[in-house]
Image (cartoon, grey):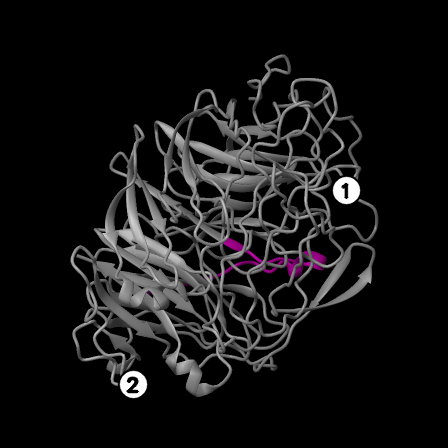
């Protein structure tokens, strides 16, 4: 079901396009990004990188797209979306000063910040509207993509070009217009067959006791910073633990998957291991090793605390990300294993992304999509839509797909948002985005809040859909710029649809964090938007020289993280769903502020009154430094 063309979004919104008429053709998405160029080891920033805003809104579609189905020109990639958004929380630096990691990817401003679009002066309900999001969502750049101006003071679509440095994860061989092949390398440059972890009892943890400082005055045994709580002042939360790296990493380091909190366990994966730690003291409870690298993981666990990890099928540059392993995060026990069917042709380069909804695990990429039973790993369905094929899913209480459709003009993509039955893979309803607009992220599945972008025009919009897939509202961002970060390193073909910070939603509102007023010692606000009208309901200011990033909603409150600076600990705060000033739940110690501030591209989780923060990527210049790298920290009362 689609919205009738006569229904207009509310005036003053920021460009959420209305539905085109049903029966519109289904073109494939535009040109996908190729892999990032190698990055030199960065120096640690002393100030946070500038957060990104969003560009001006598009005009409403002028009738249905032309009925000219066909295939893209030779050399074009039939499906593509903007690359996943740059990882990292904007208020933290990279490595500590003087200790840049080898091959460490830098956090950089998004490439599409504030460039004028062709519709800026166009008549109609969208043509004269201000740019409410203040810039295109921050994303890592890909070779050959435009580098529009950066954000400038006074609104969106102004400023200077941004400097972009990709993560050093692949080299590119250009073989034709718009076509890239991935040529990767590293320490493991052979095609040995892997041995995926077998079913059975949880393996014993490999972490030595001296890898954890439990804040008890005994230290880690490896250095003299000893008791992390020695300098704790009245009213400050306790440091529950600080862990250090115990994994022998490849050159360039490795990305971190997670964090997942299940009961009294906090778990994460990195390189060739998934490990569970005690949420109370950080002691490693269990470890699941692999012979090859982790390459994909869902953002959410199943309702009973299980996760499915994807690992590569071999070592070296020809490895494919297609081996699945179920792990019970409460116990570390391994369950079933399964293979994702291999794609053929050019789409064999596609990276699959994983999501869990109900009893179904989905694996989706540009070439195909599949559903697997969480009970036994058996394939339930594949390619659930003939005309428009899902390339990514968002899980949780609902299963939402982003689908790309065939078109005669590969530069003008046609995409859909679908609600999918997890058991059958069949769409229960479909929302067609206007021509040229791509599904970028799902900020919330229930209520359904979706970010869509127009790559050619460098524009961004956030829309709310109802339970039948009809346009419920468009978010009216006014004149503010918004700070949304969606984590994860560069994915060559494919993107996780979920896992963003700076946004959350509940039954009463959608919440977004604004951009800080300045890079250091600035402040910002959390803005609540009415789901039915898209209009702002209230604002809550972080306070002098503090900023807030929305993490989640819990018990009728908005939970936000106030990042640490070099001389003040971070904090976890709550805002009532009805508005008001933030109330600090945990004030982290000033004595450990520098440690907290130094986690690179951090992963964050708040559960049961505890706050966990971990580096999103771990890297070092040598083995000695590698084993001294701080990887995860927890706070509580």
Against 591, residue 102 (above or below) is below
Image quarter (top left, top right, bottom left or bottom right) of the C terminus: bottom left
Does 342 appear in magenta?
Answer: yes
Q: Quadrant of residue 207?
A: bottom left
Is label 2 in a helix, a strand or a loop? loop
The residue that appears at 21% across and 51% down in the rendered structure is 609
Q: CA distance from mark 2 to mark 1?
A: 57 Å
Q: In this rendering, would 223 be left or right of 77? A: left
The nearer-to-camera label among 2 and 1 is: 2
Is label 1 in a helix, a strand or a loop? loop
Q: Which residues are magenta?
A: 333-353
**Disc number for residue 231:** none
Q: In this rendering, would 179 be left or right of 501? A: right
Kindly identify which residue carries mark 2. 222
The residue that appears at 49% across and 55% down in the rendered structure is 487
Image quarter (top left, top right, bottom left or bottom right) of the N terminus: top right
**Residue nearest the viewer, comparing 108 with 260:** 108
The residue that appears at 28% across and 70% down in the rendered structure is 242
Task: Tell me if residue 109 can be seen.
Answer: yes
Residue 169 picture location, percent across and down: 60, 69
Task: Tell me if residue 332 can be seen.
Answer: no
Q: For the residue carrying disc 1, how many other residues have a C-alpha within 10 Å: few (<14), some (14-19), or many (20+)?
A: many
Residue 296 picture location, percent across and down: 49, 60
Give the mark nearest the N terminus, 2 or 1.
Answer: 2
The residue that appears at 83% across and 55% down in the rendered structure is 177
Against 146, residue 542 (above or below) is above
Q: Quadrant of residue 309?
A: bottom left
Total labels drawn: 2
Residue 373 picture location, percent across and down: 40, 50
Residue 610 picture location, percent across and down: 24, 55
Kindly identify which residue carries mark 1. 410
């Amino acid at each position: 079901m689609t919205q009738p063309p006569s229904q207009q979004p509310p005036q003053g919104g920021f460009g959420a396009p209305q539905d085109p008429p049903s029966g519109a053709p289904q073109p494939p998405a535009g040109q996908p990004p190729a892999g990032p160029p190698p990055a030199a080891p960065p120096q640690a920033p002393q100030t946070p990188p500038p957060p990104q805003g969003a560009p001006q809104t598009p005009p409403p579609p002028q009738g249905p797209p032309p009925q000219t189905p066909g295939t893209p020109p030779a050399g074009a990639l039939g499906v593509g979306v903007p690359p996943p958004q740059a990882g990292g929380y904007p208020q933290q630096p990279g490595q500590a000063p003087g200790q840049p990691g080898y091959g460490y990817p830098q956090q950089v401003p998004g490439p599409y910040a504030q460039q004028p679009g062709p519709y800026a002066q166009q008549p109609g309900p969208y043509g004269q509207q201000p740019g409410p999001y203040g810039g295109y969502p921050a994303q890592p750049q890909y070779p050959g993509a435009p580098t529009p101006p950066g954000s400038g003071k006074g609104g969106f679509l102004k400023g200077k070009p941004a400097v972009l440095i990709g993560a050093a994860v692949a080299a590119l061989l250009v073989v034709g217009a718009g076509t890239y092949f991935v040529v990767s390398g590293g320490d493991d440059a052979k095609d040995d067959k892997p041995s995926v972890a077998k079913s059975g009892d949880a393996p014993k943890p490999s972490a030595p006791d001296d890898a954890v400082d439990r804040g008890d005055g005994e230290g880690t045994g490896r250095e003299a910073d000893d008791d992390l709580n020695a300098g704790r002042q009245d009213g400050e939360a306790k440091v529950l633990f600080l862990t250090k790296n115990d994994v022998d990493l490849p050159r360039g380091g490795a990305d971190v998957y997670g964090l997942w909190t299940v009961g009294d366990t906090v778990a994460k994966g990195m390189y060739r291991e998934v490990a569970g730690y005690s949420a109370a003291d950080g002691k490693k409870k269990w470890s699941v090793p692999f012979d090859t690298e982790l390459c994909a993981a869902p953002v959410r666990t199943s309702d009973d605390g299980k996760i499915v990890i994807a690992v590569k099928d071999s070592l070296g540059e020809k490895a494919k990300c297609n081996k699945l392993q179920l792990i019970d995060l409460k116990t570390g026990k391994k369950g079933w294993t399964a293979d994702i069917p291999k794609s053929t042709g050019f789409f064999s380069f596609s990276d699959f992304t994983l999501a869990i909804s109900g009893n179904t695990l989905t694996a989706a990429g540009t070439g195909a999509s599949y559903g697997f039973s969480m009970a036994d790993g058996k394939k339930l369905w594949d390619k659930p839509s003939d005309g428009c094929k899902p390339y990514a899913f968002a899980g949780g209480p609902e299963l939402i797909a982003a689908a790309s459709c065939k078109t005669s003009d590969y530069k003008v993509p046609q995409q859909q948002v679908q609600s999918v039955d997890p058991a059958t893979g069949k769409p229960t309803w479909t929302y067609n985005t206007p021509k040229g607009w791509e599904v970028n992220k799902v900020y919330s599945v229930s209520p359904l809040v979706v970010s869509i972008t127009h790559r050619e025009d460098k524009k961004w919009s956030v829309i709310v859909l109802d339970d039948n897939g009809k346009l419920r509202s468009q978010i009216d961002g006014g004149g503010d710029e918004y700070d949304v970060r969606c984590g994860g390193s560069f994915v060559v073909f494919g993107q996780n649809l979920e896992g963003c910070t700076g946004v959350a939603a509940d039954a009463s509102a959608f919440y977004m964090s604004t951009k800080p007023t300045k890079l250091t010692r600035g402040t910002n606000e959390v803005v609540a938007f009415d789901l039915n009208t898209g209009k702002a309901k209230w604002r809550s200011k972080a306070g002098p020289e503090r900023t807030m990033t929305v993490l989640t909603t819990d018990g009728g409150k908005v939970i936000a993280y106030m990042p640490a600076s070099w001389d003040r600990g971070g904090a976890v705060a709550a805002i009532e769903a009805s508005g008001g000033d933030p109330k600090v739940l945990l004030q982290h110690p000033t004595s450990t502020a520098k440690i907290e501030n130094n986690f690179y591209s951090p992963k964050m989780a708040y559960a049961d009154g505890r706050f966990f923060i971990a580096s999103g990527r771990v890297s070092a210049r040598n083995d000695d430094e590698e084993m001294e790298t701080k990887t995860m920290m927890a706070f509580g009362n």
